Image (cartoon, rainbow, N blue to C red):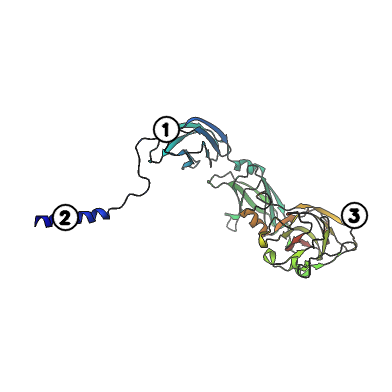
Amino acid sequence: MKKKIFFILTLIAAILWSCEEEPRGQVPLDSIPPGQVTNVTVENVPGGSIISYDIPGDEDLLYVKVIYRLDNGSIMEQKASAYSTMLEITGIGKGKPQTVQLVTGDRSKNESKPVEIEIEPLDSPIYDILTSLQVNNDFGGLTLQWDNPLQADIIINIDTLNEDNEFITAETLYTSSIVGRGSLRGYDPIEKIFAFSISDPWGNFTDTISGVYLPIYEEQLDRTRFSRWNPPGIPYMELDGTWRIENIWDGLGANTGTGYSWPTSAQMGDSWTMNLGVTAKLSRFKIHQRMTGNQQYTGANIREFELFGSPHANVSDDESTWIYMGAYESYKPSGLPHGSVSDEDNEYAMAGEEYMVDISIPPVRYLRFKVNRTWGGANYMQLMEVEFFGQPQE
């Protein structure tokens, strides 16, 4: 009987033991903390610091981490692998001294005693960017331009007063462009207060600057009045009966299969012309480049061109018979090399690339686009859609 009872108890114990949760993750190998980093040097940069060091000789070293504080008091950690000898602190707003800790960790989940060092980051780039910000009255709203030489990820916050005299968000621009450009549209020609500040992904904010601005009246020109037109000496060039110039004012944008294309026999320096159907003082225009087939910022998309205009049809291929309206270059926000595009590039191109017309240019009815360079080096050009804005004079 005793043997039977013993057997039953042993069986129950075995079952209970087999049901215990197995340990997960790295099983500690020892309880000995790794050595500390040595020969620490600090390079203070805008918004942070770059810390270099020598790693200890522990074979089971897993990482080195730095512990620091943001301006809002949040404790942050940045880690580097055991094969790296550098860590970067990011997210600092206003530069001021602070003591940070460098800690090593090993595969047994042991950590060293911290090495404390003093850093004094430079101010975040957002403050210099705000200083560079230029805001001007423009047709239908405002134009903004700023310098961001370090290509910092920034947020430009634009607020305005509502009917209750409370500030509300008018526009938010996310960018890392070296030379930033932005616009605010859709406002009546009435004086209005706008306020501007710049922030970063870590919640650092500049002061707010504000001013009274007066948008200039504009409207989008009626595309149903546009038509093909060519003066003496500037013949029409079309790839075939499908890629016709009328496609670029059909209102379908850049996602259609066809736009306007020259044949491959064309050359850079050739021109195409059109009739707006109304004499207008132009404020700006948009060109939608070809994006189908991932051709944005490549292929035959226009990169550099010159614009000419005339209020009358008595012009020819002689450029002196036209009003010179300016030289333009297509803008790629990321600045990435040919063949590479960022999400910001795609969003910018999808919205239609906007070009401003100098306010001193007189009203025109006929336009001439002289194409000097394409993004992919093609000797012919393509585009999908055009839009024009300004003040009709009729």
Q: CA distance from mark 2 to mark 3?
A: 108 Å
Dot 2: element: helix
Crowd around label 2: few <14 · some 14–19 · many ≥20 (10 Å): few
Q: Is residue 318 left or right of residue 377?
A: right
Q: Is residue 185 visible?
A: no
- Disc with the residue nearer the chain's start (2 vs 3): 2
* Residue occupying image coordinates x 67% and y 63%: 292
Asked if 248 appears above or below 107 in the picture, the reply is below
**Residue ID for mark 3:** 320
Q: Is residue 176 left or right of residue 85?
A: right
Q: Nearer the viewer, residue 188 or 40?
A: 40
- Disc with the residue nearer the chain's start (1 vs 3): 1
Please provide percent x and percent y for residue 114. 42, 33
Residue 35: mark: 1
Dot 1: element: loop
Crowd around label 1: few <14 · some 14–19 · many ≥20 (10 Å): some
- Disc with the residue nearer the chain's start (1 vs 2): 2
Q: CA distance from mark 1 to mark 3?
A: 77 Å
Q: Which corner quadrant holds the N terminus?
A: bottom left
- Three-letter code for the amino acid on which mark 2 is drawn: Leu
- Three-letter code for the amino acid on which mark 1 is drawn: Gly
